[in-house]
Amino acid sequence: DVKVTQSSRYLVKRTGEKVFLECVQDMDHENMFWYRQDPGLGLRLIYFSYDVKMKEKGDIPEGYSVSREKKERFSLILESASTNQTSMYLCARQGAWDTQYFGPGTRLTVL
Amino acid sequence: QQQVKQSPQSLIVQKGGISIINCAYENTAFDYFPWYQQFPGKGPALLIAIRPDVSEKKEGRFTISFNKSAKQFSLHIMDSQPGDSATYFCAAAYSGAGSYQLTFGKGTKLSVIP
């Protein structure tokens, strides 16, 4: 069974706080992804990483950064959280072909 | 910007009926078309996928129909059950870029009523 775990299911933060969302995969796969999911907008790619210390911007990288120091761990960082970053955040890792396996998501609320 | 347009936004089907969700894409370089199913409180999970060398793929009650010339693909759920109630996302990718990025549709919320 594919395992992608995310550190928190629910998170409440205040505007201006620095927020870390952690994602860990159980396989030795290079490609990992961070998405945000909002009603009516589907899933939008924030950043992805194709190897340790390697990253590329997705469609909506503004206000976010990422860190990948080890192959199994991919972190999403909100440098200064804002209310418009209230959302569901989903981490995924690459599988066979173009398949992606998702974690359960972190619902972040920024007050 | 690459887009995948999905319709309808929501769908209500009676138990035993056929659910049909449609997607259209623009980029002819796309060569992989998966459908994901998401239940409340869970991450999306791969349901079924197709490549453009075939026009149809069937797995149990789920079928993808693919029309390359029209740049459209659809998901059919036969004999829909209340347990199929979920949000469905179509997606598209082109593996030639090496990065395996998926472009998702905006989702369809399916409700199957008894």
Image (cartoon, rainbow, N blue to C red):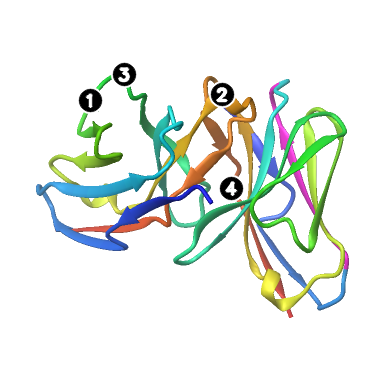
The dot on residue A104 is 4
Looking at the rendered image, the quarter that the C terminus of chain A falls into is bottom right
Kind of residue at badge 1? Ser
Q: Is residue B33 above or below residue B6?
A: above
Mark nearer the viewer, 4 or 2:
2
In terms of image quadrants, where is residue B55? top left
Distance, label 3 to label 1, CA atoms, is: 7 Å
User: Mark 3: few, some, or many residues within 10 Å (few <14, many ≥20)?
Assistant: few
Look at mark 2 in the image and give the residue it sits on. Answer: B96
Q: Which residue is mark 1?
A: B55
Identified by mark 3, the residue type is: Asp
Q: Are marks 3 and 1 on the same chain?
A: yes
Residue at 23% from the left image edge and 52% from the top image edge = B82
Query: Which numbered tag is attached to residue B53?
Result: 3
Give the answer, above or below, for where A109 lies relative to B45. below
Give the spatial CA distance, label 2 vs label 3.
16 Å
Q: Position of residue A30 (x, y in %)?
A: 73, 25
